[in-house]
Image: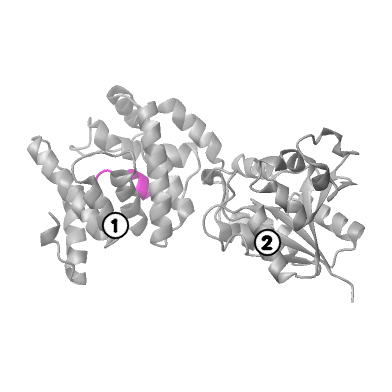
């Protein structure tokens, strides 16, 4: 019985497109592969977490795209692995499943040029053969960082390449341009059904603009809030995509002067109550909400509420609102009396942690002889009622 030949097509697939499918089919035919396994990455170390959609969406799109090809299959092997995912670990795991099979790893020439930077790259040929796909004839001549032993396991395969990139697809969606024939029809429907890439569009672009609009200290704080928000979202089963988006925008308007905020509010007919009006600390949330919605096509109401109310909180906050507010309090760069206590309380009950944070804010504002917004008082009381219903003791936390 001959050994089976298994093709491996890895990537973020954000989204998978027709170029991926065409290349996989060409390699399958050329090497007479028994199957091609599409493996969406978990959290690849070479990607900034901001730029990768949630794994479940990428996995679902892969399954939709390959459904009509009996030789194509998908795998959760990397998505199910916690933390950063590395190719060497994936190949080792695959070898335990496909003991007597030959594995063919399908990559582009740009990938093989930089593969020497991957974790334990010199061990990769022990587990796989590489098929390097390009539209023009290529050779090993320029791969000066790879040993002859490595190159013995590299094949170069010239084939027409469909000039499509996932980046171009995301940008087309953001710019309301067509992606028809760039992706499978079912994938296209899935993207629009789940509003992918419109709200997220491209985080790199948002971050570039954000960095222009805030101080370096504020930018570092926002990065900290993003990290905390995503961590909290994962811990408490909230959409990491939504948490990330709300965290990015929560202080977007913090770099504006008081005068600019008032002019912006007037020009865009934003209503502020008597306590908010003229107070930068309280105005920036609503302005950031407006910018996110009108400049960046963020239309998820839960995300927009989390942006607007992250400073004051409010009665009947959603879980996302609570976690964004809490992330703002506890991100790693924060240093103020009691912050470590709040961080520790997160592991007990995030409602208790946020209740404690609001208490601290109210006490601080009273000591500074400043007005406490009624929403903050209502949020504190709302959280207390939740804790009382759950039988959580709050007396011994101060």
Q: Horizontally, is 230 left or right of 354 in the view?
A: right
Q: Measure the C-alpha gap from mark 1 to mark 2.
A: 37 Å
- Residue stretch in magenta: 305-312
Mark 2 nearby-residue class (10 Å; few <14, some 14–19, many ≥20): some
Decide which of 235, 104 is in the foreground and name it. 104
User: Residue 62 — which label?
Assistant: none
Residue identifier under label 2: 92
Of the 4 image quadrants, the one containing the N terminus is bottom right
Say what secondary structure mark 2 lies in: helix
Q: Nearer the viewer, residue 78 or 72?
A: 78
Residue at position x 63%, y 47% in the image: 119
* Residue depicted at 24% across the width and 51% down the height: 342
Q: Which mark is residue 346?
A: 1
Q: Quadrant of residue 385?
A: bottom left
Q: Is residue 186 above or below residue 144?
A: below
Q: Residues within 10 Å of mark 1 (few under 14, many from 20)?
A: some
Can residue 314 be seen in the rendering of this structure? no
- Residue at x-position 48% and y-position 52%: 241
Q: Is 349 placed left or right of 305 in the picture? A: left
């Amino acid at each position: 019985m001959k050994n089976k030949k298994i093709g491996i097509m890895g990537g973020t697939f954000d989204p998978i497109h027709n170029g991926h499918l065409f290349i996989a089919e060409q390699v399958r035919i050329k090497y007479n592969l028994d199957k091609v396994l599409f493996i969406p990455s978990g959290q690849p170390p070479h990607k900034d977490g901001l730029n990768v959609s949630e794994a479940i969406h990428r996995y679902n799109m892969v399954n939709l795209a390959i459904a009509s090809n009996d030789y194509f299959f998908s795998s959760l092997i990397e998505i199910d692995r916690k933390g950063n995912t590395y190719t060497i670990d994936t190949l080792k795991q695959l070898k335990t499943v496909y003991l007597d099979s030959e594995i063919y790893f399908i990559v582009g020439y740009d990938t093989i040029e930089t593969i020497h930077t991957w974790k334990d790259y010199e061990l990769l040929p022990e587990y796989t053969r590489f098929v390097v796909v390009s539209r023009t004839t290529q050779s090993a001549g320029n791969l000066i960082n790879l040993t002859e032993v490595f190159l013995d396991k590299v094949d170069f395969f010239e084939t027409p390449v469909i000039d499509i990139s996932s980046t171009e697809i995301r940008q087309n969606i953001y710019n309301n341009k067509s992606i028809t024939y760039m992706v499978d029809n079912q994938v296209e429907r899935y993207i629009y059904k789940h509003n992918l890439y419109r709200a997220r569009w491209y985080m790199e672009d948002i971050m570039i603009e954000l960095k222009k609009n805030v101080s370096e200290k504020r930018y570092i704080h926002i990065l900290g809030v993003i990290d905390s928000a995503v961590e909290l979202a994962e811990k408490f089963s909230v959409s990491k995509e939504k948490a990330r988006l709300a965290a990015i925008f929560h202080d977007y308007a913090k770099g504006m002067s008081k005068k600019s905020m008032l002019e912006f509010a007037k020009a865009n007919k934003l209503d502020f109550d008597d306590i908010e009006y003229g107070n930068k600390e309280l105005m920036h949330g609503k302005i950031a909400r407006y910018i996110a919605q009108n400049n960046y096509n963020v239309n998820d109401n839960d995300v927009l509420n989390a942006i607007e109310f992250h400073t004051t909180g409010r009665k009947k906050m959603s879980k996302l609102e609570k976690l964004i507010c809490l992330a703002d309090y506890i991100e790693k760069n924060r240093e103020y009396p009691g912050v470590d206590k709040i961080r520790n309380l997160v592991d007990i009950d995030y409602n208790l942690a946020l209740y404690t944070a609001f208490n601290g804010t109210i006490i601080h504002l009273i000591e500074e002889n400043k007005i406490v917004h009624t929403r903050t008082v209502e949020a504190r009381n709302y959280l207390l009622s939740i804790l009382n219903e759950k039988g959580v003791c709050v007396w011994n936390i101060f």
